[in-house]
Amino acid sequence: MLKFDHVSFSYPGMEQTVKDLSFEVHAGEVVAMIGSNGAGKSTVSRLANGLLRPDSGHVYVDGEDTGKVRTSAIAKKIGFLFQNPDRQICQNTVREEIAFGPQVQGVPQDEIERRTEEMLQTFELDGDWFPFTRSRGERQRIALASVLACNPRLVILDEPTTGLDYRECIRIMDYITGLSFEKGLTVLMVSHDMELVQEYAQRVLVLTDGRLVDEGPTGRIMKDMSVLGQAHVLPAQIPMLALRFGDKFSDVYTVEEMAEAIHREKAAVTGEKGGKGASS
């Protein structure tokens, strides 16, 4: 669905921000991109949706070279959620905001109304709200609803849970990953939240200084302290705890798996002690 083929890019008067970058995100995957500030994550996101064009190399979206098609054509396939929702909200009511994208795409009016009502219900929004009077978390939900109303094939989420409380975060991510599972939506998530990455990403791209230092299954990346150290990030709490506990916890990544492993080890220790008592 998304392919970077030896892509390099630099802003005018600056050193290269992205350096000979190659990776693929396959249809239906939920992939996280991690790295410290300045690693090039936001630039990669803008290269992916055609807002920026590479200095060298090629970016392909659904097999099409973004350098050879209009940005408007790319926008029909890719939805982009900015870290700051105020950068993309532009209408006077929530209902108008959600309907705006499909209208620009030329979607029939009855379908626009159906999608709009579906998004209002899904994200528990009032269509008559003036968006800029709402809380940061509500504005983030409004922006995401407007993106998903366009029925993109790939969604790029730049820090998608900024300003959301834990309950809102889980609800939104469950919904997005549900679309991936049920409808084949492809998700590229840029995040500093390793708990979020651990919980929802199937695969992780690790960037530092504009280069891809590693990529692979989330579980492996989360326990590779060398790779995470290069990206200046720490693993999620449970994988970090499992690393401290040693080899017997090598297959532990979630709270449930940790609880099961502790119970297993406790039972093993109790059984050893019981055996010794019986023999004496």
Image: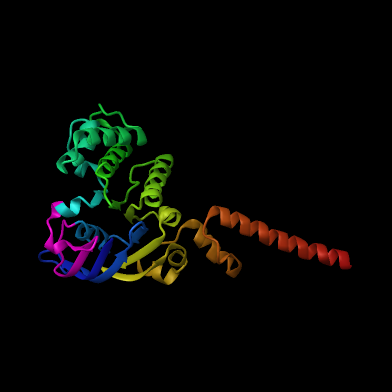
Q: Residue furthest top?
A: 128
Is residue 63 rendered magenta in the image? yes
**Which quarter of the picture shows residue 140?**
top left
Residue 186: name its quadrant: bottom left
Q: Nearer the viewer, residue 173 or 13?
A: 173
Q: Is 195 situated left or right of 94 in this image?
A: right
Q: Which x, y percent locates residue 145?
A: 29, 40
Residue at (52% x, 56% y) in the render = 254
**Range of residues picked out in magenta:** 50-72
State whether residue 232 appears in this view.
no
**Looking at the image, how many numbered discs can be counted on the residues?**
0
Farthest residue toward the left?
Answer: 12
Q: Does 191 sit left or right of 240 as displayed?
A: left
Percent across and percent down for residue 117 are: 30, 32
Residue 176 percent across, percent down from the top left = 37, 47
Q: Nearer the viewer, residue 142 or 135?
A: 142
Q: Nearer the viewer, residue 156 or 185?
A: 185
Q: Report whether residue 2 is seen.
A: yes
Find residue 142 and report its horizontal and vertical position in percent.
28, 38
The image quadrant where one finds the C terminus is: bottom right
Q: Is residue 111 above or below residue 257?
A: above
Q: Quadrant of the N terminus?
A: bottom left
Up the image or down, 104 lies above or below 267; here it is: above
Magenta stretch: includes residue 3: no
Looking at the image, which is closer to me, 99 or 190? 99
Residue shown at the point (32%, 48%) measured from the top left:
160
Residue 144 against residue 260 in the figure, above or below: above
* Residue at the spot 42% in from the left edge and 72% down from the top edge: 226
